[in-house]
Image: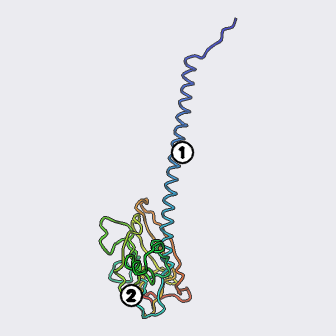
Amino acid sequence: MRLRRGITLIEFLVAITIVAILMGAISRAFIVGLNYESSAAQARERNLVRDQFEENLRDLFRAAYLSQNQADTTTYFIGSNGDDSLMNSSSSNSLTFTIQGQRLDGTLLASTDDFETVNQRYGPAGGITEIELSTTPVGDAGTNEGLFIRRQTPSDSEPTQGGTERVFDAQVNSISFEFWDGTTWQPTWSTQVGAVKRLPAAIRVTYTLTDDEEGVDHIFTVRLPMSDVTANDPADQTGTGGTQ
């Protein structure tokens, strides 16, 4: 009668070793997969937040408005960098402009109060609105940081103050603006200097976020539909930075 041969200790140890190696490889692959899915989800979330931020800015820029009355001082478009000279080599880090056609706040639409009460509680809801965008707040921001927006409705002849201010996006670390005059990008713009007030044809925005890697810039361009500036009829940004 032939005896059945069982596995030896060496064979058992080899089998255990192979199983351990396979389990280790599978575990590492599983962990890598989880980390990748987590990183991909975070990247998608960051992209969605960034896309929404850019779309919000686009909506504001597309509503940029200047009165056809050149003597009207309550509409303007001013991009500056805090320098005493309006025209120099640095891109603007502050932008003040007037807009029209903005949607009413949902709070106003849902309110059952009469017109006078709504006007007292929320301020005027119609007319031309003054907008200022800057990482440097006009008022006391406390510990708040990021990109601030100041709104005033209706706009007045003082483009540096008034209205209410809040954080537009707390993740913005820096931002700059450039303006297309029909032939080249200008670092600054002012409708308060020069004979003819005109909107730039487009705005180029460069910004960084607090969680960006070093050296990463986000750039996008917005065409201003109410501008009459073209390559055949450019705006003259000479010397002082005003339009002619």
Q: Which mark is residue 240?
A: 2
Spot occupied by residue 5 in the image (x, y as percentages of width and height): 63, 13
Which is in the foreground here, disc 2 or disc 1? 1
Q: Nearer the viewer, residue 113 or 158?
A: 113
**Residue 130 can be seen in this image:** yes
Q: Secondary structure at mark 1?
A: helix
Mark 1 surroundings within 10 Å by alpha-carbon count, few (fewer than 14), some (14 through 19), many (20 or more): few
Q: Secondary structure at mark 2?
A: loop
The numbered mark at residue 219 is none
Above or below residue 104? Residue 192 is below
Tell me what residue is drawn at x 55 percent, y 85 percent. Answer: 231
Identify the residue at the far right of this view.
1
Amino acid residing under circle 2 = Thr
Q: Is residue 11 above or below residue 147?
A: above
Display coloring:
rainbow
| Residue 240 in the image: above or below residue 163 | below
* Residue type beneath disc 1: Gly
Q: Which residue is mark 1?
A: 33
